[in-house]
Image (spheres, rainbow, N blue to C red):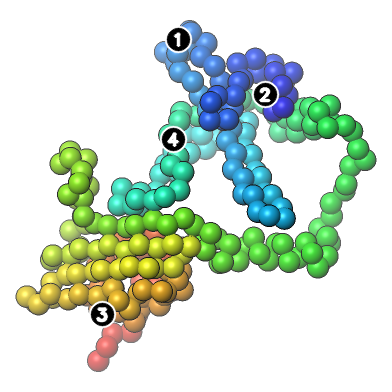
Amino acid sequence: MVVRALHKLGVDRAMVNTRHDIVLKPTGEGDCGFRVFKVSGSAYKLTRERSLHHGTCLLNSPNIRNISKYLRSPAARFIKARGVESVSSQVKNVKVANKAFEDAVVAEFAWMYGSQKPIILYEDLKEVPEIAKGLEELTSPDWIFSQTPQFTFSTDQSDKPKKRRHPLPRDLPPGFKASFTARNGVITEADIQYDDNGETVQMGGELVNKKIHEIDWNKFPNQFVDGPLKWFFRLFSYHFKHWRGERKRNT
């Protein structure tokens, strides 16, 4: 449907690939003439009583060169997950005006499913109880964090070839090792170790059955906060919201 809309707007190279993404076919000309560029993607969630779907299309994004940077998580190199892994693709703008694209897609939708009287949405619809409830759910921590598939974070890279291993930051304490497994945002296993003045500190049990985004990390030892926690914050950012880089020192 969207590809047909793009064709009518003059984007003849648009097509759907085997992953159901919209891409631009190669032109066979110039340095980039043999590359396939992704211009759209979609995601969906199905439940027993409803479905959610969203799609994207790169029209005239001024940030086209930075998209890959925004999508590349610094924590990914240390994570193994059960979810569907994303496939990196080169991207490109289709260079179509927003309004023209919207009108073309609406026209194709009406052609496929029949034209009906449009429903006009207003800001005050947010006060309708059913809509307000839906908005509250979609912005809640439970929706944002508790719907994630199981993943394991580990600093152990012994299973990787040496060329693919990533060095740990130098500001981590000696002998630092960390691993934890989380499912639906809740830590199910955890083991953290590091050396403190010649003694091995081991922790992790206190994290089990805790929601990652609700843990008060400031309650942990100073050496952990000053080293590993700062690194975790750089990797996971919002998930460690209870830590702000400041804390009162124990006296």
> Which of pointers 3 and 1 lies earlier in the amino acid sequence?
1
Q: Residue at x 48, y 62 (%)?
A: 184
Q: Residue at x 87, y 48 (%)?
A: 120
Q: Does residue 234 appear in the picture of this structure?
A: no
Foreground disc of the pair 1, 4: 4
Crowding around mark 3 (Cα neighbors within 10 Å: few <14, some 14 to 19, many 20+) is few
> Which of pointers 4 and 2 lies earlier in the amino acid sequence?
2
How far across and down, in percent of the image, does residue 175 sit? Answer: 13, 65
In the image shown, does 62 or 30 lie closer to the viewer? Answer: 30
How far across and down, in percent of the image, does residue 160 sit? Answer: 20, 43
Q: Residue at x 62, y 34 (%)?
A: 57
Is 99 placed above or below 26 here? below
Q: Which disc number belongs to residue 87?
A: 4
> Which of pointers 2 and 1 lies earlier in the amino acid sequence?
2
* Residue ID for mark 2: 3
Q: Does residue 221 appear in the picture of this structure?
A: yes
Outermost residue on the bottom side: it is 251
Q: Is label 4 in contact with label 2 (beta carbons under 8 Å)?
A: no
* Residue ID for mark 1: 30
- How far apart, in angstroms, are the residues tagged by discs 3 and 4? 39 Å
* Residue ID for mark 3: 221
How far across and down, in percent of the image, does residue 237 sit? Answer: 41, 61
